[in-house]
Amino acid sequence: MSPRTIGPALPDEATPPGAPLAIRCVGLVKRFSGFAAVDGLGLEVPRGALYAFLGPNGAGKSTTIALLTGIYGADEGTIHILGHDLRKDPLSVKASIGVVFEELALFERLTARQYLVFCGRMYGLPGAEAVRRCEELLELIELSAKADTLIADFSKGMRRRLCIAAAVIHAPRLVLLDEPFEGIDVLAAAVIRELLKELKRGGTTLFLTTHVLEIADRLATHAGVIVEGRMRLSGPLDALKAEHGVQTVEALFEKVVGAPRAKGVRLSFYGPH
């Protein structure tokens, strides 16, 4: 399934020639009680990229996604999404993107099929088209057999797959995912990986946060590392690895952020019995 197979992409007139960016942020700042959770962030994500947005806990990743999706308003700086100024034209931005937050919010008394059709209709799809896309997505996320099961009875992995399907039913050109692999089993993770690969093949730009650095290694074309609200590096992943002389995202992350403090620690009380 790709945006090109489930429906036409939204028009692209707003994108300036010579600037094929899905996301462009300049000087982005967000403060909470005087604390800058995002501090002068600059970010460019090319169209069609799978961008892994990495950083330690509390670095500002989720706050950045909340800014990019309009949940929070920036205190300073500018955000352009698919050529649209988020502050001036929020409706065009929200019609063009799909979002999956780390904390899942679903209507638990609906079935999977009812929920997806509802989401499609909310995005303005005709009834028959919403049903068609629903069935295609249910098959792709391997939930066809559970289509008429209440969401209340779903596991966390099933819920996350369903949330991603709901986020792409309207064929957005940009999908933002906050920790899509958090707390799910190996099988659910494999299904989500294949879904992301299919979306990327269709030309969708993907922007995701993840603590599972192996996932970034396997999927990402571009990456950025944020620490204490500031970007430490950003760019094509292969170029970043070459620049820093590393082979993996984990090694790149440790080189930029620092090795875990517990590495090499020994317990004085633990040994052979």
Image (cartoon, helix red, strand yellow):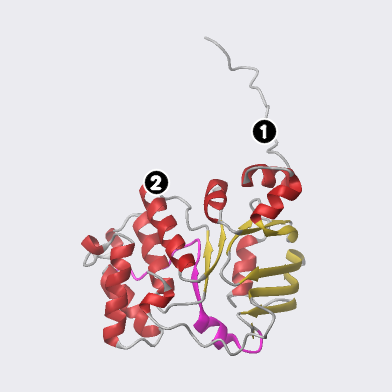
Foreground mark, 2 or 1, reads 2
The verdict on residue 91 being magenta is yes
Measure the C-alpha gap from mark 2 to mark 1: 26 Å
The three-letter amino acid code for the residue at tag 2 is: Val
Instruction: Compare residues 60 and 217 and report the one nearer the observer.
Output: 217
- Image quadrant where one finds the N terminus: bottom left
Percent of width and height locating residue 114 = 27, 75
Q: Residue at x 70, y 39 (%)?
A: 259
For marks 2 and 1, the one nearer the N-term is 2
x and y percent of residue 44 in the render?
Answer: 69, 69
**In the foreground, 261 or 131:** 131
Count neighbours of disc 2 (C-alpha within 10 A) and say few if under 14, some if 14 to 19, many if 20 or more: few
Q: Is residue 225 left or right of residue 114?
A: right
Q: Position of residue 6 (x, y in %)?
A: 36, 77
* Above or below, comparing residue 146 to residue 263 in the picture: below
Q: Which of the 4 image quarters holds residue 47?
A: bottom right
**Dot 1 corresponds to which residue?**
262
Please say whether residue 20 is one of the residues in the magenta stretch: no
On the question of residue 110 being in view, the answer is: no
Q: Which residue is mark 2?
A: 186
User: Is 174 on the left or on the right of 63, as rendered?
Assistant: left
Q: Quadrant of residue 130?
A: bottom left
Observer-nearest of 247 and 215 = 247
* Residue 12 position in % (x across, y down): 56, 86
The magenta-colored residue range is: 87-110
Q: Quadrant of residue 136?
A: bottom left
User: Residue at left 63%, top 21%?
Assistant: 267
> Eyeballing the image, is 260 above or below 132?
above
| Residue 219 seen in the current view | yes
Q: Residue flagged by tag 1: what amino acid is it?
A: Ala
Label pair 2/1, CB-CB below 8 angstroms = no
User: Label for residue 8?
Assistant: none
